[in-house]
Amino acid sequence: MVDLKGQYHGIKEQVNTSIDAILESSAFINGPDVKEFQKELEEYLGVKHVIPCANGTDALQIAMMGLGLKPGDEVITADFTFAATVEVIALLQLTPVLVDVEPDTFNIDVAAIERAITPRTKAIVPVHLFGQCANMDAILELAEKRSLYIIEDNAQAIGASHTFKNGKKQKAGTMGHVGSTSFFPSKNLGCYGDGGAIFTNDDTLAHTIRGIVNHGMYERYHHDVVGVNSRLDTLQAAVLRAKLPKLDEYCDARRDAARKFNKAFEGQENIVTPKTVNGCAGICDTCDCHVFHQYTLKITNGKRDALVEHFQEKGIPCGVYYPIPLHKQKAYLDDRYKEENFIVTNQLIKEVISLPMHTELDDEQINYITSTVIGFVNG
Ligand SMILES: *Cc1c(COP(=O)(O)O)cnc(C)c1O
């Protein structure tokens, strides 16, 4: 699905030199690379504060702790996402409220959010799924009207932008009150272990969060709030510093592969290619609205499962993200959920398949993948 080794070879010298220097200095925790990476990412994203942490799940949890959400507060998020999003809501004893998504972008459905709002609703967590922003115009408007916090789960869309209706453009993760990301190796900006970060433009919230990630300490050995231990280590920061300057190039390579996939699947009746929003009908050369963390097709003639098996036989990697909606997961069952409110997710789990997508895909691989899909689905 990803080719981390090929990508490593492109930055090997820089990565190895930085790692050697860190080994010599032994500054494994809070070394200078962490601060430098923080500044570089703030500049790249155009956000006031980046707070690095240990992983993307922690980043979400800490964001919610920073906002002071209390047990019983309802937090609305998408039914069709990775479990980390709902897990931290439940861990903090907040009440997760899952809602349906849009059938073409796979992102949270704003009308469904609106229907789910109650007097106890405190926050919305839009997940920018597969590399493309949720409908942030409508979500921010709704949040403002109903005085709700927006926590962007940006684990899959770092580097993507959202163009607002008024023409203003902002990076994914920097539009809400707070955003989170993951540097898990297979994410678009991945390190060589676990890593994550929290973003915000709010000075007070940033200060609160900087204490929370460090045991609730704002002054050495004074613990003002209950915190956690969540750090990005120096070695990971050094890897990320080598990769950040190449992030746009990596995103371009993914978009380029997506464009070729799209072209190959043009006119295929039973294969639906992913929709890109922000006004570009297809995937234009200049638009950065989608960074294709995943390239996800819908197979509409009932052959998805058989296609997955066929891929396995042929030795082509593929993924089904996600095979079970969160509202049907044992850990998150809730009497309030009615199947008629999850029509889209219930359908998507039967149709989606994600193809190999990374920065090192060549034309030969793309042709092999697309002809295998087309041959099988029409066969
Ligand atoms: C990967 C991911 C996370 C969690 O990130 P980790 O670094 O693995 O903890 C959270 N949300 C989404 C949508 C993800 O894809």
Image: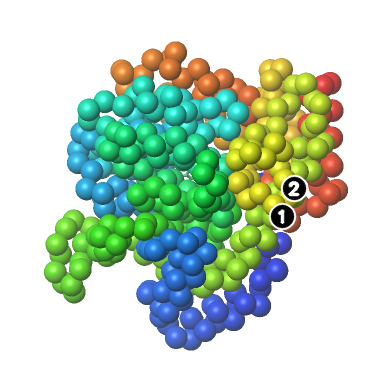
Residue 85: image quadrant is: top left
Residue 261, placed above or below residue 227: above
Q: Position of residue 241 (x, y in %)?
A: 54, 71
Residue drawn at the location 70% of the way across and 36% of the way down? 281
Count of marks overlaid on the render: 2
| Mark 2–mark 1 distance (CA, rounded to whole Å) | 6 Å
Q: Amino acid at mark 1?
A: Ala
Q: Residue 340 in the image: state x and y as whole percent.
A: 44, 13
Q: Nearer the viewer, residue 77 or 227?
A: 77
Q: Amino acid at mark 2?
A: Ala
What residue occupies the far front of the structure in this picture?
166
Quarter of the image for residue 330 reads top left
Q: From the viewer's perspective, tell me whether residue 350 is left or right of residue 171.
A: right
Viewer-nearest residue: 181 or 30: 181
Q: On the image, numbered disc 1 is attached to which residue?
A: 253
Residue indicated by mark 2: 257
In the picture, the quarter occupied by the C terminus is top right
Residue drawn at the location 39% of the way across and 63% of the way down = 48
Q: Does residue 215 appear in the picture of this structure?
A: no
Q: Is residue 375 above or below residue 360?
A: above
| Disc ID at residue 52 | none
Mark 1 residue element: helix
Using the image as rendered, state which of residue 251 and residue 233 is in the foreground. 251
